[in-house]
Amino acid sequence: MTSLFSYAFIQAPPADFRPDYQSERGYVDPYVGWVWGVLTWDLGRSSKYRMPIGDLVRDRAVNTVILVGLTILFTWSVAIPIGILSAVKQYSLLDYIFTFISYIGVGTPNFLLALIVMFLLLDQFGLNVTGLFSDEYIRAPWSFAKLGDMLKHIWVPVIILGTDGTARLTRIVRANLLDELSKPYVDTARSKGLPEWKLILKYPARIALNPVVSTAGLELAEVFSGSLILATVMNLPTLGPLLLDSLLSKDMYLASTLLLITTFLIMIGMLISDIVLALIDPRINIKA
């Protein structure tokens, strides 16, 4: 379905503007050829950049996957412990502090947060945090040295991009855990002398994480969409700015390919989240 919509974008401009794409052959034959090209990584040529789309998006796709993957990892590793602690310490000073920070995180657009962080780091510490690589690694082939240089630069975009998701997941984990802690089986486990933190982590916390895992695909889609504007503001070599540029320049072949790649990555993320959910929750029958 996504491939049909993606190819419809290619057919949207008048035929005179796409003479290289055999538009005179109708719709079905070029569509089949385009799908086969996608499967074989023959993605056609960009009308603006005058180069193969596969060469144009390869490095940017890798950068995007790394950025989004680290953002999801950061979001979960911060939101889950804070959400659990906030629920266990309900109505305490710590809970109020976490709640206040969460509301700020949800209400602050990531591009605005990026501008504030960029200004403060440059003004106070002289650090330029735009881009993902040092100048000598921008066009260099992938190596351990280039990966290490990327990890030195990527932490600021990861934190900024993950702020909104972290704030929302913190509230979700807190609400779900509070609901589980009020159920009778928790009181039964306490009455049998099970240590408090062992009880919380072994039973209620596992169940409270189910909505977090099940919505990982939606979280992945939001991170992808959020990275588009953030990458433009921070000059990150990811798929987002390239997609925006292709739409502005009416390079429909490139835009449709980027849309298809992004959708495919989101579907892979949703599949992984469903598998993980089936593994952590024994009540779910993976064969069903």
Image (tube, rainbow, N blue to C red):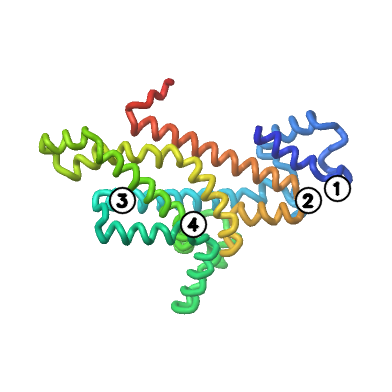
Distance between the Cα atoms at labels 3 and 4? 19 Å
Q: Which residue is mark 4?
A: 161
Which numbered tag is attached to residue 47?
Answer: 2
Secondary structure category for the residue under label 3: helix
Q: Nearer the viewer, mark 1 or mark 4?
A: 4
Which amino acid type is marked by label 3? Answer: Pro
Q: How far is the residue under mark 3 from the one under mark 1?
A: 54 Å
Q: Are marks 1 and 2 in contact (CB under 8 Å)?
A: yes
Q: Amino acid at mark 2?
A: Ser
Question: Distance from label 1 to label 2 (Cα)?
Answer: 9 Å
Q: Callout 1: helix, strand or loop? A: helix
Alpha-carbon neighbours of circle 1 within 10 Å: few (<14), some, or many (≥20)? Answer: few
Going from N to C along the chain, the mark reached first, 1 or 4, is 1
Give the answer, above or below, for where 264 lies relative to 81: above
- Dot 3 or dot 1: first in sequence order is 1
Residue occupied by mark 3: 81
Alpha-carbon span between mark 3 and mark 2: 48 Å
What residue occupies the far top of the structure in this picture? Answer: 288
**Does dot 2 land on a helix, a strand or a loop?**
loop
Residue 217 image point, x, y percent: 49, 40
Residue 148 drawn at (x, y percent)? 45, 59
Quadrant including the C terminus:
top left
- Dot 4, crowdedness within 10 Å: few (<14), some or many (≥20)? many
Residue 209 in which image quadrant: top left
**Residue 169 as seen in the image, left or right of residue 22:** left
| Image coordinates for residue 135, horizontal then vertical, percent | 57, 67
Mark 2 vs mark 4: which is more N-terminal? Answer: 2
